Structure formats: C-alpha cells, structure tokens
Amino acid sequence: MRLLDNLYCYIWTGRGNNCHSYLVAHVLDGERPHVLIDSGHLVNELRESCFEHLLGIMKKDGIEAQDIGLIINTHSHPDHCEANQALVEITRAKGGRAKRALIALHQDEAEYQRAVGNWLAKMMGREAKFEPDFYLQEGKLSLGQVNLEILHTPGHSPGSISLYCPDNQVLITGDVIFFGAVGRTDFPGGDGRLLKESIERLSQLDVEHLLPGHSTELGHIIRGADRVKQNFAFIKTNYFPFL
C-alpha cells in the first residue's frame, strides 16, 4: 500500500506472526535506491511464507527486491529481521558497483543480539544471524531528500529505535507502541520503565501517521493527529499502571 509519495506500507495480514515492513522508495543514489524498514520472517510458526509474500506485494508496486540498498531494523527480534540475509543475497546477485544491500540497527541492539538475541531466536526455533554494516545513532539520518530522525526508544528491547519524518509527520514505532497496545517487556532485555519513558517521549511529537510493527484487533496504521493523540492517551491510561 502506498501511503505517501515514496512511502509504502506492507501490512502483514497472515494468520501467524510476522511484522509489518515499510519501504522508502527512490531515495538513495546509485543502483539500489530503496530503503526497507524491517524485513520480517522468512517463514513463520504456521509455515506461512512471509518473505515470499513481501517480495510479491512489493513487485506489484513496481519495487524489485534487488533494488533495495539499505535494510534498517527497528530491533533484532526474529520476526523483524530473520529475512535480512536472504534479502542481502538477492541484492548481491544483481551485481554492479555496489555489491549488496547494507544492514543497519542501533549499536545497543547489535550487542543485545550477540549476547541474548541469537539465543532467544534459537529458543524459538529460529536463526536470525546477521552482522550490521553500520550502527544507527540518535539523531538525523538523511536519505536523499527524505530527512529522518532516529530515536532510541528502548523498553521492548535495549536498542529498539523509532523513525520519525518531521516533514510528513510520519512515525514508525517498531514494537514500542501499537494501535491500542504496547510491545512486550517479558522477553530478555525488556524493561517496562524504559518502555514508558520511550512512549512518553514519542507522544510529544507531531504525528499524522503512526506506523507500528504489528496489527492488533483494533487495526494497524493510525491516521490523523487526533486519533494518534487518542491512542497515546489510551496507552497511558490503560497500560502505564502495569509497566
């Protein structure tokens, strides 16, 4: 689904677990101009082919996987990054001066992945090994004419990030906050106090489009500043006392 001029939202609608993926198109120089945020599972617990599904719906939008030059992970849980390496191999097969897509995430998350994340993935019967090519830090990230702000928003995991585009008032939250719900804190590395602080911080932004990492029974994308504010207020009232 095309949300804005160069922003595509790929909402997971299967029965089993997988994340939503978001793509910023035609922003990088060179042969691979697209940026993918969260690659998702290869195959989930119900044997649904999540990655093949993503490739198919991107292709319907005229987006070829081999033209992705950067993969940004909001965090390192397998349902957000298991397909990283498969996507890198697709881009590597294209050839050209740039050898492949690059992978980026927060340094705290990379350290968490090495210490705990790979163990957690194995406990879930997963293999989500990858090495980041560079680390994302708190601050501005320029993708061509698209200016993003990288926000370190721990709580669901130590190095979780959210991405904010002030020009379009778009906020991508990973598993920090959803439509009427919040990310889990009972996994290793989760911290309810930090999650509250992260959500409080995000609630101060001017947001017209809130793009979470998963759907809930209430829905997926939240559109409209008033509805976004109502969602933050609901979370603070109904979840903060228990975090």
Image (cartoon, grey):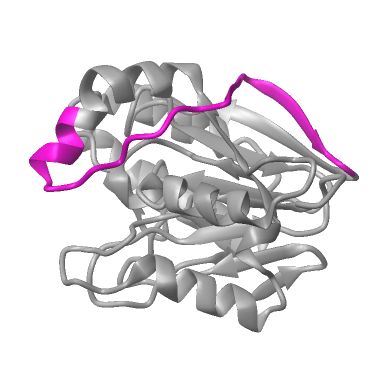
Residue 42 shows in this picture: yes
Q: Residue at x 55, y 78 (%)?
A: 57
Q: Is residue 154 above or below residue 75?
A: above
Compared to 177, does 55 lie above or below? Answer: below
User: Is 138 in the magenta?
Assistant: yes
Q: Is residue 91 left or right of residue 154?
A: right
Would residue 123 be counted in the magenta stretch? yes
Specify whether 192 is left or right of 70: left
Q: Residue furthest right?
A: 145
- The quadrant of the picture occupied by the C terminus is top left
136 lies left or right of 149: left
User: x, y percentage for residue 72?
Assistant: 57, 40
Q: Is residue 184 left or right of residue 157?
A: left
Snapshot quadrant of residue 93 = bottom right
| Camera-side residue of 63 and 217 | 63
Q: Is the residue 116 above or below the residue 207 in the image?
A: above
| Region rendered in magenta | 119-144
Look at the image and tell me whether residue 225 can be seen: no
**Picture coordinates of residue 80 (x, y %)?**
39, 48
The percent coordinates of residue 211 (x first, y second) are: 55, 57
Q: Looking at the figure, which quarter contains the N terminus?
A: bottom right
